[in-house]
């Protein structure tokens, strides 16, 4: 019988680095206890009148997302600041935020929130699902079956403890689909349950789901 670990909290740790440096950051993070991460590609603006004149003022960035146990938060901030000089201006940016719920991490246990007395019934939460490339449609189908009205699909790459494929003795970082769904709090649990069952998220390496609180929304039809 599986023992439910009580009071276990998680954080979403986000770090933005120059393109090509993300793998090194993830490697150091794993040494500190992180089990894996997902990369997104982005663009950053470099403040330089000369580069702007030459049309080279936009630089490619890697955004590394890591869901971590709360106890690692201070350690990551401290050690990654020391290793990658996060304290230098216009260098590397890192921030972390609380995660309401998570499925897919080793020993993680999704715990439904239940009804909140006196709460706003139309409050929203963000459900983020990260799976192998090509499975986003399955995620959306499962979410719609549970009452979701839609979502947004992003593409990234990931490297986790269960992903060991190599080519010519070099580690391959598989491509990922990231599905972002905004849900009213009363539907979040059933959407998460539907996705985890359809995609077998509880199996090692199958993916990860985490839920973030949304404080304010615009443009959503209630």
Image (spheres, rainbow, N blue to C red):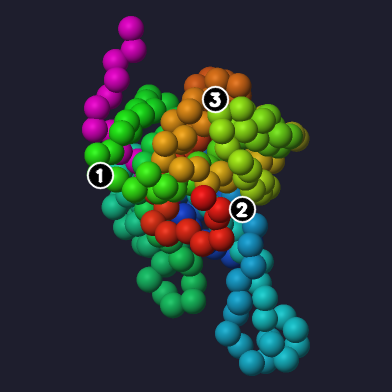
Residue that appears at 56% across and 33% down: 147
x then y, percent, for residue 43: 64, 67
Locate residue 161, reporting x and y percent: 52, 31
Q: Quadrant of residue 181?
A: top right
| Res 54 seen here | yes
Can you tell which mark lies on residue 194? Answer: 3
Left or right of 76? Residue 207 is: right
Answer whether labels 1 and 2 touch (C-beta < 8 Å).
Answer: no
Q: Is residue 188 above or below residue 58?
A: above
Looking at the image, is mark 3 or mark 2 earlier in the sequence? 2
Upstream in sequence: badge 1 or badge 2:
2
Write down the residue under mark 1: 118
Decide whether residue 7 is among the magenta residues: yes
Please state which of residues 121 and 179 is positioned toward the viewer in this rendering: 121
Q: Secondary structure at mark 1?
A: loop
CB atoms of marks 3 and 2 within 8 Å: no
Q: For the point 34% across and 12% down, which residue is it?
A: 2
The stretch in magenta equals 1-13
Query: Which is more toward the observer, 161 or 202?
Result: 202
Mark 3 residue element = helix
Q: Is residue 26 magenta?
A: no
> Within the image, what quadrant is residue 134 found in?
top right
Q: CA distance from mark 1 to mark 2?
A: 38 Å
Q: Considering the numbered disc 2 on the image, is that residue within a helix, a strand or a loop?
A: strand
Image vertical order of residue 94 relative to residue 37, above or below: below
Q: Residue at x 72, y 80 (%)?
A: 56
Classify the position of the N terminus by image quarter. top left
């Amino acid at each position: 019988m599986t023992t439910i670990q009580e009071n276990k909290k998680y954080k979403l740790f986000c770090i933005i680095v120059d393109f090509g440096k993300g793998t090194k950051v993830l490697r150091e993070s794993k040494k500190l206890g992180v089990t894996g991460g997902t990369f997104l590609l982005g663009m950053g603006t470099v403040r330089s009148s000369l580069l702007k004149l030459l049309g080279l003022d936009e630089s490619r960035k890697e955004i590394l997302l890591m869901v971590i146990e709360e106890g690692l938060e201070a350690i990551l901030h401290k050690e990654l600041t020391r290793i990658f000089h996060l304290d230098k201006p216009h260098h590397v940016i890192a921030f972390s935020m609380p995660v309401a719920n998570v499925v897919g991490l080793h020993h993680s246990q999704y715990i439904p929130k239940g009804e909140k007395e006196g709460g706003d019934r139309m409050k929203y939460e963000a459900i983020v699902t990260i799976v192998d490339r090509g499975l986003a449609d399955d995620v959306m189908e499962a979410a719609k079956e549970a009452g979701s009205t839609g979502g947004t699909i992003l593409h990234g790459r990931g490297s986790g403890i269960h992903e060991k494929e190599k080519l010519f003795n070099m580690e391959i970082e598989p491509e990922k689909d990231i599905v972002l769904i905004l849900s009213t709090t009363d539907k979040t649990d059933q959407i998460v349950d539907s996705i985890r069952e359809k995609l077998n998220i509880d199996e090692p390496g199958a993916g990860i789901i985490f839920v973030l609180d949304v404080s304010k929304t615009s443009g959503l039809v209630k």
